[in-house]
Image (spheres, rainbow, N blue to C red):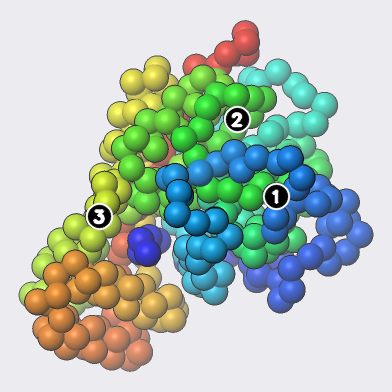
Amino acid sequence: MATDTGPGTGTGTPGGAIPAQPGPQDDEAAHSVIPGAGPALRPGERATLRLRGNDTGSEADEPARYAPEWLQLREPADAFARAHDLLDPLRIRLANLPKRADGFIIHDIGCGTGSMGRWLAPRLDGAQHWILHDRDPYLLHFAAVASPRSAADGSRVSVETRRGDVARLTPDALSGASLVTASALLDVLTREDVDALAAACAGAGCPALLTLSVAGRVELTAPHPLDQEITEAFNAHQKRGGLLGPDAATAAAEAFSEHGATVRLAPSPWRLGPEHAELTAQWLRGWVGAAVEERPELAEPAGRYLTERLEACAAGDLRVVVHHSDLLALCRPVGGAA
């Protein structure tokens, strides 16, 4: 499993919490979620989004990529880290789109538990219809139920879910889209996947806001002799199988630029202190574990390193900065839009 890394407060449910049980919790929620969308494909429905071909078995047999508990734990950190400076140019682009009766159509690719929608929808004016894509039906239930119901100006926000995974998209799949979003996704794609995503967004003339891609740089206090070695091993692990890992934001910027988009990159680091001890400890275990998987000879010294870092974390003495990058690609509008 790729270990994407990446505090703040979520919106949508109190404290950003994921509902205990999937399914609409009130009448308003029930009317804001498209009936029948969720855990399984509807009759005749095609999974429009796929990360890589799976010729050996059903998607339903594959384990979930990320546990909802991990996604919930990291959601406040993600919300706080995302680059707010990218919102104004995005709002300007959306304001210049032709007005639609159903508002903006926003595709959230690899939505997980829906944290991007909970963060972004209440920061945009105007009615919005979010189309949430993920291959995990359990996460799709959480995403739909916990989605916000109103925009910044009080306009209605509705959602639907689509079972599938990040695809080699076509412009047709994004027909009518106002915006494509994703969070902690680019680094677990290949260059081919990113090129296809850029081409699809450019073909549909819609902007893309792609946040929290790992940047391959970590700062821990106090410095330790093994910091750099573990960082390098982790970064190599992230690039297994042709995945972009820490090169993702740069590769995506190049791909969108080649399709004529105006691209803005902005830092979006996690800044973890004593108040984030649980998240920091979970991140440490995953970070060191991936490094050891990449370089088994590190197992013994990395084990001691992890014990020391976890003890410092529990004592409130550890601070960590995990660097990420956010990307806004403003593709050239099609169909005469401003």
Horizontal side, residue 309 vs residue 71: left or right:
left
First in sequence: mark 1 vs mark 2? 1
State the residue lying farthest toward the right.
27
Q: Please identify the quadrant where the C terminus is shown.
A: top right
Q: Which mark is residue 173?
A: 2
Residue 338 horizontal side relative to residue 71, left or right: right
Locate residue 54, reporting x and y percent. 46, 49
Q: Nearer the viewer, mark 1 or mark 3?
A: 1
The residue indicated by pointer 1 is 41
Image quarter of residue 179? top right
CA separation, marks 1 and 2?
16 Å
- Distance in Å between CA atoms under marks 1 and 3: 31 Å
Earlier along the polypeptide chain: callout 2 or callout 3? 2
Of residues 155 and 22, the one nearer the viewer is: 22
**Which disc, if any, is residue 197?**
none
Give the x, y percent position of residue 19: 71, 71
Q: Amino acid at mark 1?
A: Leu
Q: Which mark is residue 240?
A: 3
Q: Position of residue 128 (x, y in %)?
A: 73, 38
* Residue ID at (74%, 61%): 145
User: Element under label 1?
Assistant: loop
